[in-house]
Amino acid sequence: MFANLPAMALRVRKAIIPAAGLGTRFLPATKTIPKEMLPIVDVPTLQLVVEEALASGIEEIILVTGRGKSSIEDHFDVSYELERTLSDRKKSELLASVEKISKMVRMVSVRQKEPLGLGHAVLVARQAANDEAVAVLLGDDLYDCDGRKPATRQLCDAFDRAQGRGVISLLEVAAGEESLYGVVAGKPDASDPSLFAVSDMVEKPAPGTAPSRLAIVGRYVLPPEIWPILQSTKPGKNGEIQLTDALKTLAQTRGCVGITVDGIRHDAGDRLGYLGACLAYAMKRDELRPGLTKMMKQLIAAG
């Protein structure tokens, strides 16, 4: 029903960021601190994801939260007392960095009252998304695309080339790791070899059963057709409404393609991946690189 909509109707203006998870892999730190607020050096993980979305042309963020996540909303709100204190103490650079956060984005927050899966988390944002095409960005996946288009922009451009078919970010994972991801089957798209035409998807396949080593990793651009599909998707693996199941239906109806993002992906939802992201982002900062390099050499020598 959406195939003949004009291009403007399919422009991606909104992004959904699910942030309702419990963050159990980072306990006990996440007992009181949302995992999305764990810092990459001194910037919350979620802020890096929001900045990527804004750099990609997204105009509005729809944040899907759960209980105990109010600090996320507070982070993007005005902090009068802090700003006044920084102003009084003439801390102009710090004041500018804090004010920038509260002014950077129009954000809408919706609540996922039960942990019923990623598909359900996206679905509860339906009203805020107004049934439009949307980007979905998972906070566990960070993409460092310095000097290149931001990851979400790359998917939005592919969405245009794919004429409104769904777009997912793909990564070839090591053999044996397929069961940690949603995995796709398919082949290069006949009309555009830069796109991978998806024919099937499996959520966390049992070892030895994956259709490929191409895993879905944290970024999606979805057409309006996804909403009624999600609405009718039944609980699947682990009794949850899986986004992968809805994407499989989308692939078989409207169509779905994958791209490999031109950039470095960090899995900030894994403890080693998180530490790697902290080191990688710290090494990009001139004021930290020399001291960090020296420290790492000392630690390696001492180990």
Image: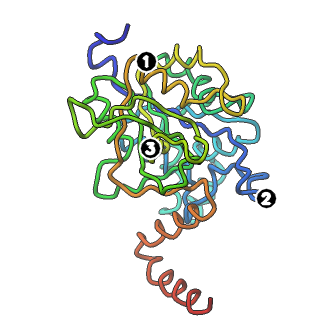
Residue at x-position 56% and y-position 56%: 268
How crowded pointer 2 is (Cα within 10 Å; few <14, some 14-19, many 20+) is rated as: few
Measured as percent of width and height from the top left, residue 290 is found at: 44, 83
Residue at x-position 35% and y-position 38%: 155
Q: In the rendered view, would you say 100 is above or below 297?
A: above
Q: Which residue is mark 2?
A: 28
Q: Is residue 300 left or right of residue 239?
A: left
Residue that protrudes farthest toward the front in the picture: 208
Q: Which residue is mark 1?
A: 224
Q: Nearer the viewer, mark 3 or mark 1?
A: 3
Measured as percent of width and height from the top left, residue 230 is found at: 56, 19
Q: Estimate the spatial distance between the alpha carbons at disc 1 and disc 2, rounded to whole Å.
A: 39 Å
Q: Which residue is mark 3?
A: 212
Specify which label sits upstream in the sequence, 1 or 2.
2
Q: Is residue 14 left or right of residue 24?
A: left
Q: Disc 3 marks which amino acid?
A: Ser
Q: Disc 1 marks which amino acid?
A: Pro
Say if mark 3 contacts mark 1, CB within 8 Å.
no
